[in-house]
Image (cartoon, helix red, strand yellow):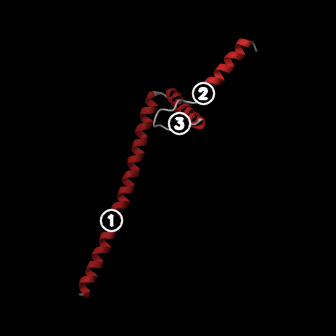
Amino acid sequence: MTTKTVNRVKKAVEDVMVQPEVIEGEKKETVLEIFIDHQRRAIEESGRALKALIPEAFQKHSEAAYKEAVEGYRTLVNSVIDEIVDQIEKVKLNSDKLDQRKN
């Protein structure tokens, strides 16, 4: 490597190693937190890149299919909840009738 390249690499390393300034009242970020933030953003950008490869019509129909599936599960869960509530009310009514007969 040439001296110019070595100096450029040293400068790049120094720029990376510089700790962020502490803003008054805010917590100083650690190098690990900065690294994790960069990795999170890299994953988000990778997701956007993959999404860009998928045709728009496919994305549209996939989203509609997902919403329909969620609505199906919502309907199923709500019907189970309604059935449970009905059973609880029946038990409560029977319990009240038994209490009235005892008195």
Mark in the foreground, 2 or 1: 2
Q: Is 57 or 5 nearer to us in this picture?
A: 5
- Amino acid at circle 3: Lys
Q: Earlier in the sequence, mark 3 or mark 2?
A: 2
Q: 41 above or below 3?
A: below
The residue positioned 58% from the left and 30% from the top of the image is: 19
Q: CA distance from mark 2 to mark 1?
A: 61 Å
Q: Are marks 2 and 1 in contact (CB under 8 Å)?
A: no
In this figure, what is the number of numbered marks? 3
Helix, strand or loop status at disc 3: loop
The label on residue 85 is: 1
Q: Residues within 10 Å of mark 2 (few under 14, many from 20)?
A: few
The residue positioned 27% from the left and 75% from the top of the image is: 93
Measured as percent of width and height from the top left, residue 71 is found at 38, 47
The label on residue 28 is: 3
Viewed as shown, does residue 3 lie left or right of 76? Answer: right
Extreme front residue here? 24
Kindly identify which residue carries mark 2. Answer: 18
Mark in the foreground, 1 or 3: 3
Q: Earlier in the sequence, mark 2 or mark 1?
A: 2
Viewed as shown, does residue 95 lie left or right of 1? Answer: left
Q: Is 73 or 23 nearer to us in this picture?
A: 23
Q: CA distance from mark 1 to mark 3?
A: 52 Å
Q: Which quadrant: the C terminus?
A: bottom left
